[in-house]
Image: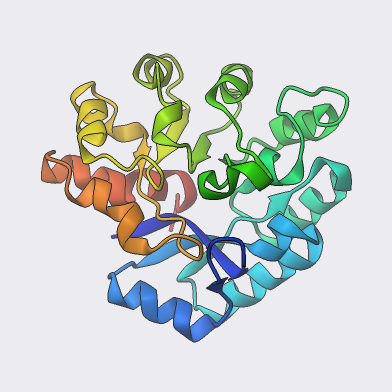
């Protein structure tokens, strides 16, 4: 099974128009033989978190299980939105510190939400930002991610969109933190995937494209062209994320 762990719906308009048409979105998944994808919305990312999450659920309900909602939380909205999303059936939750302008290590703004998240023990996705628009929206650095990941051990953490230039020391970091997973959309180099697999980390790598902003082919090519075993590829393109999100299905 091919599962894209990082897709986004709606208009973006900075360096990419985005995808706001459901049928167009599904047709692109078909073209690349993607069986399922995890999805959030640009509306939740850029404007109104709650309304954007509602849009995400609308698309997922239309998809007959092919799209899996990963709702966004913003610490400025408090924990009420998180509680609502768990009641809606969310299998995981997502943070976007860069777009929502907060630090994972700011106990005054983020501390209450972090404590609540740790109590829920749900898989947590961290969107590190959009490297191509970093001047406008900034990005979340590995230096900020690392201490958060090291103290947040209650559930799996999936790092989305980390740029290849931010991966210095990642091999040792992943070995020391087996609850942390690295998604592939901005890693760019197939040889780097091979390096991580050669280090025994194939169970902590997850394929994603950033589709809706990126092209699917751009994000998946680093995995598809990596010179690794077929078994390792199966883990990266579907088995690893299925173990986290689709347990019992």
Image quadrant in which you'd find residue 30: bottom left
Percent x, y of residue 47: 78, 60
Percent x, y of residue 7: 49, 60
Front residue of 183 and 84: 183
Q: Is residue 95 left or right of residue 35?
A: right
* Whether residue 12 is visible: no
Percent x, y of residue 46: 72, 57
Q: How is the image coloured?
A: rainbow
The residue located at (82%, 40%) in the rendering is 75
Image quadrant in which you'd find residue 137: top right
* Whether residue 100 is visible: yes
Image quadrant in which you'd find residue 31: bottom left
The number of callouts visible is 0
Percent x, y of residue 176: 42, 14
Most distant residue in the front direction:
135
Front residue of 242 and 208: 208
For the C terminus, the image quarter is bottom left
Front residue of 207 and 166: 166
For the N terminus, the image quarter is bottom left
The residue located at (57%, 68%) in the rendering is 9
Q: Is residue 76 left or right of residue 21?
A: right
The residue located at (48%, 37%) in the rendering is 162
Q: Is residue 105 left or right of residue 229?
A: right
Q: Is residue 79 above or below residue 2?
A: above
The residue located at (38%, 81%) in the rendering is 27
């Amino acid at each position: 099974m091919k599962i894209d762990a990082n897709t986004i719906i709606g208009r973006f308009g900075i360096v990419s128009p985005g995808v706001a048409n459901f049928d167009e979105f599904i047709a692109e998944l078909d073209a690349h033989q993607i069986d399922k994808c995890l999805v959030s919305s640009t509306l939740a990312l850029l404007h109104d978190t709650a309304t954007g999450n509602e849009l995400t659920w609308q698309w997922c309900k239309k998809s007959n299980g092919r799209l899996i909602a990963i709702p966004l939380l913003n610490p400025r909205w408090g924990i009420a939105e998180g509680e609502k999303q768990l009641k809606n059936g969310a299998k995981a939750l997502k943070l976007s510190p860069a777009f929502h302008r907060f630090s994972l290590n700011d106990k005054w703004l983020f501390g209450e939400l972090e404590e609540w998240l740790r109590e829920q023990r749900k898989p947590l996705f961290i969107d590190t930002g959009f490297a191509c628009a970093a001047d406008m929206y900034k990005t979340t650095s590995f230096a900020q991610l690392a201490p958060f990941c090291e103290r947040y051990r209650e559930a799996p953490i999936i790092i989305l969109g980390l740029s290849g230039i931010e991966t210095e020391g990642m091999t040792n970091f992943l070995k020391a933190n087996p609850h942390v997973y690295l998604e592939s959309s901005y890693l760019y180099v197939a040889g780097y995937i091979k390096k991580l697999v050669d280090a025994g980390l194939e169970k902590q790598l997850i394929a994603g494209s950033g589709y809706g902003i990126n092209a699917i082919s751009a994000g998946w090519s680093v995995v598809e062209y990596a010179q690794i075993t077929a078994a390792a590829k199966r883990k990266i393109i579907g088995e690893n994320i299925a173990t986290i999100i689709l347990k019992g299905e």
